[in-house]
Image: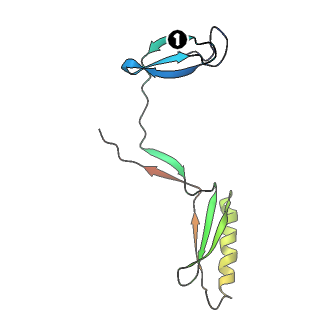
Amino acid sequence: MDKIKICPRCEDYLSEQWIRERKLQQYCKKCGWVGLTRIPEKQEIKSAKVINANRFNGFYVEIFDKYGHILLSSQSYDDRNKAIERIKRELRYSTYDLHAGPYTAILWPDKVTVVGEIFK
């Protein structure tokens, strides 16, 4: 049975709900129409997902002094090359900072892929 997207009665968009025996049913929130139940399609279970690496969207730079204390926590950059330019500028400046230099920088990625462990 094919899924329909529009209610045949009122032409509003349909929603889906789980019902007994782990079946799906389409229904209309507006007029109350309900469709026939169906067995859901099989979906592949993926053990990897891409997530944001930090609370911002984009690449993120942290600069540390020679003692390992944080000096700078940057804005996020939508372009990796702009973030690297910022790092290079800060590292050049560290050669003049006699008390805290040389600096160490970390470029945090905008997103990372994580892999989970599947159990059956």
Quarter assignment of residue 64: bottom right
Quarter of the rendering occupied by the C terminus: top left
Instruction: Tell me if residue 47 comes above or below residue 95 in the rendering.
Output: above
| Residue 95 rendering spot, x and y as whole percentages | 66, 86
- State the SS at label 1: strand
Judge from the rendering whether residue 53 lies leftward or rightward of residue 96; answer left or right.
Answer: left
Q: Residues within 10 Å of mark 1 (few under 14, many from 20)?
A: some
Q: Residue at x 39, y 48 (%)?
A: 116
> Can you name the residue that lies furthest to the top here?
9
In percent of the image, x 66 and y 88: which residue is there?
Answer: 97
The colour mode here is rainbow
- Residue drawn where x is 53% and y is 12% of the image: 34
Where 74 sits versus 93, above or below?
Answer: above
Question: What residue is shown with label 1?
Answer: 35
Whether residue 61 sits left or right of residue 26 in the image: it is: right
The disc labelled 1 sits on which kind of residue? Answer: Gly
In the picture as drawn, the residue positioned furthest to the left comes out as: 120
- Tell me which corner region of the image, top left, top right, bottom left or bottom right, holds residue 8: top right
**Tally of numbered discs:** 1
Q: Nearer the viewer, residue 24 or 83?
A: 24
- The residue lying toward the viewer, choosing from 35 and 103, is 35
Above or below, 93 relative to 80: below
Q: Say which of 77 and 85 sits in front.
A: 77
Q: Is residue 53 left or right of residue 98?
A: left
Residue drawn at (70%, 64%) of the image: 82
Report x, y in % for residue 71: 62, 77
Q: In the image, residue 90 lies at what x, y percent?
A: 67, 77
